[in-house]
Image: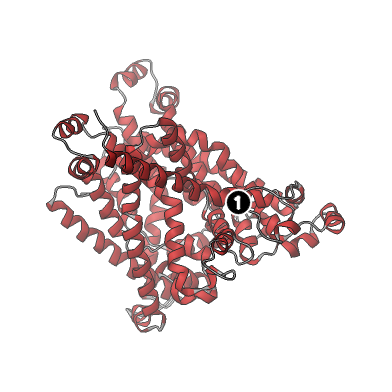
Amino acid sequence: MKISYGERMSSGVIYFLLALLVFVTFYPFWNSAVISFNTGSDTSLGGVTFWPRDFTFDNYEVVFQDKRLNQAFLISVLRTVAGTLLSIVLTAIFAYGMSKKELVGRKYYMIFCIIPLYFDGGLIPSYMLVRSLGLMNSFWVMVIPALISIWNMIVFRTFFQQLPDSLEESAKMDGCGYWRTLFRIVLPISGPVVATLALFTAVAHWNDWFTATLYISNAKLLPIQTLLQQILSSNIMSEQMMQTSSAAQSHMASARTITTKSLTMATMMVATIPIILVYPFVQKYFVKGVMVGSLKE
Amino acid sequence: MVVPALLFIFVFSYVPMYGILIAFKEYDIFAGFNASPWVGLTNFKEFLYAPEFKTVIRNTLGISFLKLIVGFPAPIVLALLLNEVKIPLFKRVVQTISYLPHFLSWVIVSGFVVTMLSADYGSLNIALEKLHLIDEPVNWLTIPNYFWTILIATGLWKGVGFASIVYLAAISGVNPDLYEAASIDGAGRFKKIYAITLPCIMPVISIFLILAIGDLLSAGFEDILLLQSDIVRDVSDVLDTYVYRVGIRNSLFSYAAAVGLFKAIISVALLTIANAIARRSGNSLW
């Protein structure tokens, strides 16, 4: 079939618009990475855009030697691992129970779960609850309130209900109870769903900065995102550098090439790396995840 | 198997719902929740007459409407554009890059925004100076007039790609025979989009629109909190950030809870109304 002039023109416009979108989306990321690899003193002269002009690893050296940043990174890793593992296991158990037809009052439990999706107490009552539970300034405040995800339960449940009954019947014949059936038979064949939900949960844990802002004042318990937010908002980095290891200090004295900006950019990159690492895996699964997630509506 | 989780939901979702009663009390930190005296609607009245009421409501509605008008159709347009791409590699690159910002935290995104817009050789200033559109660097984030634009653009940057996934999936579910028939009838690209694609994905669009309307009073929280400063407070304070500021920072629990409840009630009402309207076309949530 002949392609008309108009069709070709509009194709050109479409490709151009999408290429522009790619550029606009990617550039901030690229530029920040470039600044993190450029000496701070050179960056402050201006004009650093697409390529580092005075390439260096100094910013990263300082970031990796900073005790507070290392601690925050560790906290982030711990809460992400603990939060994801516990939440997925507990939510799966919950969902498995909810998927059973023989569960008495199942319909009412479901309504009980759906109401909070549309109406919740809001920030202040939640804050007061956490406070009265004694979770303030505790590592677990970043894990416990997020243990059961109602959304994830619905996704799990939908998946479990689609599994053929015969699978579980044979397990039951062999004398497996609900628990063993879940862990030995059902979960092992739920790989893709578990992976999708685990990755989404992990990303959410890694990116969450607000929980810690709200409930944690102990600087040793802050996750990297919260610490980064504090650095960005008050640029306490320069002041912080005075107090960090002497290695960083002598570095400063000898080179004076590091600025608040270059350090902040390097910290930002470090806080993003885990996301970039898991992104290819997330991408593989998330289309499926989004679809299952939107089924509930 | 379900009892522990139900108890958990009871504690973390239903107890705060009960805790919202604090909005009708005057919270006394020493007396505690139960012993604090009832004050009826005093807190709500106080909010309605507060000098911030007008600005907060104006900002909430303004930002929210702009986000809806720009942010709602954008992913649909993106999905339609992507659907026209016939080169698989190009399509994959666009998708990979445009989905990525969704997975970055708001802290990182705000860091990017600050870097791009910085008066200290931020890229936007460099570009605009090269194009001779401005004579000297502008500190964009400190100018109230630009704040809403920055906020909407940032939200678009972060969300448009990922939001397009659902629409792309819906488009791929359209029966290809329809397009073929249209081609034989001589329909061009735009005619096909207008006459086939859009009507076919209408149910999906409708459901997301209902949800978006229910969320009208959520103008944003993390993005505003991270990008605002005292200089732009007048144009950036919305209901959610206001609740956080007066409630947590200033410890006015009862007053802030009242503001929060005010928001929650209107949101549920909006959702119900939007759903009722959508039900007539058969695409409602419930």
Observer-nearest residue: A232 or A54?
A54
The residue lying furthest to the front in this view is A5
- The image quarter containing residue A2 is top left
Look at mark 1 in the image and give the residue it sits on. A31
Q: Tell me where residue A228 sits by quadrant.
A: bottom right
Picture layout, residue A35 above or below residue A78: below
Q: In this view, does B237 lie above or below B104?
A: below
Residue A291 in percent (x, y) is at: 34, 38
Percent coordinates x, y for residue A262 in the rendering: 70, 56
Q: Which residue is drawn at 34% across and 68% down?
A: B263
Answer yes or no: is residue A103 visible: no
Question: Relative to A181, is A29 on the left or the right?
Answer: right
Question: Seen in the image, is A11 located left or right of residue B222?
Answer: left
Three-letter amino acid code at the position of disc 1: Asn
Q: Where is residue B237 in the image (x, y as percent from the top left)?
A: 44, 72
Viewer-nearest residue: B65 or A246:
B65
Residue A285, picture quadrant = top left
Question: Where does the image place residue B283, in percent across and percent down from the top left?
Answer: 18, 47
